[in-house]
Amino acid sequence: MKREGYLSWDEYFMGVALLSAERSKDPGTQVGAVLVNSENRIVSVGYNGMPRGCEDDVYPWEREGGMLDTKYAFVCHAELNAILNSAFGDLRGCRCYVTLFPCNECTKAIIQKGISEIIYLSDKYAETDGVKASKKMLDSAGVKYRQYTPAKKTLSIEL
């Protein structure tokens, strides 16, 4: 008889997204994303950070100020990193597990690559125009999205 209480696919993949977010050097917001194919295989992961070759200590991490004095002109979001870092060109039918609901820019890339579903943990910017635009585009394109609700408070492994 198999053991009970093992992780569901949603728990597993969101756990990987949360672990990926821990790689982010952003002092304010850490986001992780995992792309999963129809066979429940991880095809890519990403987290928010500076583009390759752009040193973390040279670019700003501030949230307020002029465009060039804040992180917003420079940081690559987790979803876009996962898409760009994928070794697979074809992402049609994949699911995207992400710790924060995608912005409108990442949503465009998600739609263009044919990702069919977004499973997100937090929607703390739901009332912003960017997220409202994301949901409008996702609805138009037929991309499903749903909030992940953890079934367990903590994860434990018995050896």
Image (cartoon, rainbow, N blue to C red):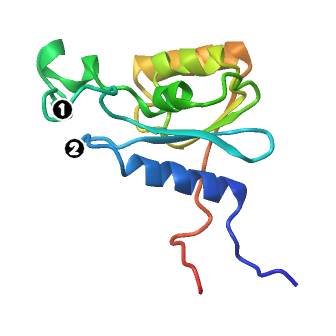
Could you say which is closer to the camera, residue 19 or residue 85?
A: 85
- Judged from the image, the secondary structure of the residue bearing numbered disc 2 is loop
Classify residue 69 as left or right of residue 10: left
Q: Which residue corresponds to mark 1?
A: 61
Most foreground residue, 68 or 88: 88
Quarter in which the C terminus is drawn: bottom right
Q: Nearer the viewer, residue 129 or 34?
A: 34
Q: Is residue 144 above or below residue 37?
A: above
Q: Report whether 137 appears left or right of 114.
A: left
Place of residue 111 in the rendered image (x, y in percent of width and height, measured from the top left): 64, 17
Q: CA distance from mark 1 to mark 2?
A: 7 Å
First in sequence, mark 1 or 2: give its number: 2
Q: Nearer the viewer, residue 89 or 129?
A: 89
| Residue type at tag 1 | Trp
Indicate whether 73 appears above or below 77. above
Q: Residues within 10 Å of mark 2 (few under 14, many from 20)?
A: few
Under mark 2, the amino acid is Pro
Residue 27 got which mark?
Answer: 2
Q: Residue at (45%, 34%) from the top-left corner?
A: 78
Q: Residue at x 22, y 25 (%)?
A: 71
Tell me if label 1 and label 2 are in contact, CB under 8 Å: yes
Q: Residue at x 14, y 25 (%)?
A: 64
Tag shown at residue 50: none
